Image (tube, rainbow, N blue to C red):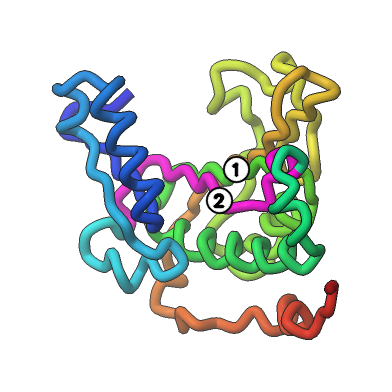
Amino acid sequence: GVGEGGHVVCNEMSAARRSKLLKVMKDFVPYDYRNLVNVTGYDATQWRKTARGMHLRAFDAVLVDAPCSSERHLLHDPQEMATWTPKRTKQNAKRQLDILLQAIFAARPGGRLLYSTCSISPVENDDVVEKLLKKRGEVVEVCGNLEDVLPVNPTRLGATATKYGWMFWPDVCGYGPLYFSLLSVKGNDAEEEDEEEDDDDDDDDDDDDDDD
């Protein structure tokens, strides 16, 4: 829950999705609790620039429910399936990493960062976390013992452990797909480093791929 003096910030850059979020809050969240929620429309890949001074190193917990390929929905949308290519997965992974590289500076030192997707692709899941650790391992680490943090061990809910997180497979547990990795923010000493630190080593080849 939200402690005394605490608040929740929900960030959604899409105006249409933000409007739906506000409607859901109005319909289902009691008024007294709605006053504790602030809905923003920042570009999460530019968090330190657009939210500077307001939401930096401010949160005990940050959830990144990242834009992803959402393959299960593709199967139910022939139009989307017809336009899908493997290149989209790589583009999503780059965007997800950009968001995470910003999100670590929204959490206070000692805070938690939960990364989540509904993709089945390791490229958008463990691979993204691995790149984050490679670039900012001095700032963030994977939580080792989830039983100290979560009320229920994910395996009891049907999750399968991955290298850096957990995966819920529909054919195993009856729901999902859902991937998550729980991270701990050690500090923000890297904040003054170049915000545009390149991803060239990992991502330059993406724009050259031709999957059509």
* Label 1, residues with CA under 10 Å away: few <14, some 14-19, many ≥20: many
- At label 2, the amino acid type is Ala
Residue drawn at (60%, 83%) of the image = 198
Q: Quadrant of the C terminus?
A: bottom right
Q: Which mark is residue 25?
A: none
Q: CA distance from mark 1 to mark 2?
A: 6 Å
Say which of 104 and 186 sits in front.
104
- Residue 108 falls left or right of residue 96: left
Residue drawn at (34%, 47%) of the image = 18
- Above-or-below relation of 80 to 3: below
Residue 71 located within the stretch drawn in magenta: yes
Q: Quadrant of the N terminus?
A: top left
Which quadrant would residue 14 be assigned to in this image? bottom left
Residue drawn at (72%, 77%) of the image = 203
Residue drawn at (27%, 46%) of the image = 39
Q: Which residue position is annotated with label 1?
A: 116
- What percent of the width, then of the height, locates residue 182? 59, 40
- What percent of the width, then of the height, locates residue 193? 45, 80
Q: Reading the chain from its start, which is encountered first: label 1 or label 2?
A: 2
Q: Residue furthest front?
A: 79
Q: Are marks 1 and 2 in contact (CB under 8 Å)?
A: yes
Residue stretch rendered in magenta on the structure: 57-74
- What percent of the width, then of the height, locates residue 129? 67, 55
Q: Which residue position is annotated with label 2?
A: 66
Secondary structure category for the residue under label 2: loop
Secondary structure category for the residue under label 1: strand
Can residue 108 be seen by looking at this rendering?
no
- What percent of the width, then of the height, locates residue 33? 21, 25
- Above-or-below relation of 70 to 29: below
Which quadrant would residue 208 be assigned to in this image? bottom right
- Above-or-below relation of 147 to 82: above
